């Protein structure tokens, strides 16, 4: 995994050492004979009431992944919620809501949860899961980690020094009539948007704050913590691949604009760029396939986006954890549609880091010009 594996494993090890009084993992036969005191044993005892098919259909997660999550949440809430069974019910109810976008009474009854407390349970558990983001959504900070991620992108596209693909996930919402224009995106529906960066394997490396869907991609990027980190060269001479809605330079590799595509190298670069950018569409499609609550988050207000932001971040955390546990998607994902680029900047305007455009041009000629010449030579043989 390209996110900080050492941090992830340390979190997992500390969890099972700190909150489990039994073995980290036990088989079904072992769980029936386990003592009643272990947090890990309690989680597996609860899950063993259901078969694997039921768990997969209800929560879109595997038994092992669910056991890990239940243990983790209980370890975080043990001071606030003394009843472990209640914490498990709240967590499973929240995970069902994430998976399906609604929470029917038959599920709350099955879990022994009062229907009137279901919304509060989702709020509480979403905050716990969102607070896990610094441990499970991490950008590669060391040179070796960055180059490991960059090698993956180079293997599929030929573009060097790329450490992530940048995109904004749009999620349908219903804003007040007085705020509709703030949330209207370029595809014509109302949404909230969250900037994300992912690696070549689909792991999320960065998730920024939620904002109305009518916000310019350029404004979202410029206000983001990742933009500030790249601008101060915390990630060295590396790039993220982004769409046409972003200005030139600023460590974001955008496609060569059509009027400037005058060489075979530029055409080959644009084809490679499109291939990488499709990875973000696949990640967004995977998120909405596993967590169908992200198809529509309901009523929102521009000055009160924190509840939906927590849900989105929680689902992003679960996305990375599910990939760590190799949990398959419930069905084939549908690629998210590409949002038309908004007009950015002004013709002739000087942007900070404009010199990066020259670096980009040199890279395109070096990496895609030579490749074209070699291909032409092979064709002539």
Image (cartoon, rainbow, N blue to C red):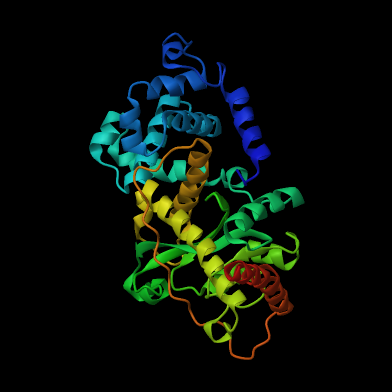
Question: Is residue 241 visible from the viewing direction of this image?
Answer: yes
**x, y percentage for residue 341?**
47, 76
Which residue in the rendered view is the most extreme toward the left? 106
Q: Residue at x 42, y 29 (%)?
A: 63
Tell me where residue 237 appears, x and y as whole percent.
Answer: 74, 64
Front-most of 318 and 128? 318
Residue at far bottom of view: 348
**367 versus 78 height, above or below:** below
Q: Observer-nearest residue: 342 or 78?
A: 342
The quadrant in which residue 29 appears is top left
| Residue 55 location (% of width, % of height) | 35, 31
Question: On the rendered structure, is 73 left or right of 247?
Answer: left
Res 206 quadrant in image: bottom right
Q: Residue at x 35, y 34 (%)?
A: 56
Quadrant location of the C terminus in the rendered image: bottom right
Q: Nearer the viewer, residue 243 or 376?
A: 376
**Observer-nearest residue: 198 or 137?**
198
**Left or right: 22, with 103 as reference point:** right
- Vertically, is 345 above or below 290? below
- Give the total of numbered labels: 0
Residue 129 horizontal/vertical position (percent): 50, 42
- Depicted 74 relative to depicted 126: above or below: above
Q: Is residue 127 visible?
A: no
Q: Seen from this angle, which residue lies furthest top?
A: 33
On the rendered image, what quadrant is the N terminus found in? Answer: top right
Task: Give the residue drawn at x 55%, y 66%.
Answer: 272
């Amino acid at each position: 995994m390209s996110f900080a594996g050492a941090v992830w494993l340390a979190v997992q090890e500390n969890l099972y050492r700190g909150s489990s009084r039994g073995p980290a993992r036990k088989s079904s036969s072992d769980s029936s004979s386990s003592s009643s005191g272990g947090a890990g044993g309690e989680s597996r005892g609860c899950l063993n009431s259901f078969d694997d098919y039921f768990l997969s259909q209800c929560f879109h997660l595997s038994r092992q992944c669910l056991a890990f999550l239940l243990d983790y949440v209980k370890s975080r809430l043990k001071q606030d919620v003394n009843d472990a069974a209640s914490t498990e019910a709240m967590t499973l109810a929240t995970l069902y809501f994430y998976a399906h976008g609604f929470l029917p009474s038959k599920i709350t009854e099955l879990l022994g949860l009062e229907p009137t407390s279901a919304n509060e349970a989702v709020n509480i558990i979403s905050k716990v899961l969102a607070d896990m983001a610094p441990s499970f959504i991490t950008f590669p900070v060391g040179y070796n980690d960055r180059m490991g991620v960059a090698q993956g992108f180079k293997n599929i596209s030929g573009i060097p020094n790329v450490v992530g693909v940048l995109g904004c996930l749009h999620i349908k919402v219903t804003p007040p009539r007085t705020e509709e224009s703030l949330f209207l995106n370029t595809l014509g529906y109302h949404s909230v948007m969250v900037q994300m960066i992912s690696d070549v394997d689909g792991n999320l490396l960065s998730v920024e704050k939620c904002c109305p869907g009518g916000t310019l991609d350029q404004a979202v990027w410029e206000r983001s913590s990742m933009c500030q980190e790249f601008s101060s060269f915390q990630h060295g001479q590396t790039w993220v691949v982004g769409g046409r809605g972003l200005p030139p330079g600023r460590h974001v590799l955008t496609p060569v604009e059509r009027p400037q595509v005058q060489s075979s190298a530029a055409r080959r670069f644009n084809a490679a760029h499109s291939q990488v950018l499709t990875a973000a569409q696949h990640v967004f499609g995977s998120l909405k396939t596993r967590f169908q609550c992200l198809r529509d988050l309901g009523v929102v207000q521009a000055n009160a986006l924190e509840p939906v932001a927590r849900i989105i971040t929680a689902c992003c955390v679960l996305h990375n954890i599910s990939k760590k546990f190799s949990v398959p998607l419930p069905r084939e994902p549908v690629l998210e549609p590409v949002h038309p680029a908004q007009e950015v900047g002004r013709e002739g305007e000087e942007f900070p880091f404009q010199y990066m455009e020259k670096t980009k041009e040199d890279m395109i000629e070096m990496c895609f010009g030579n490749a074209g010449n070699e291909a032409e030579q092979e064709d002539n043989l």
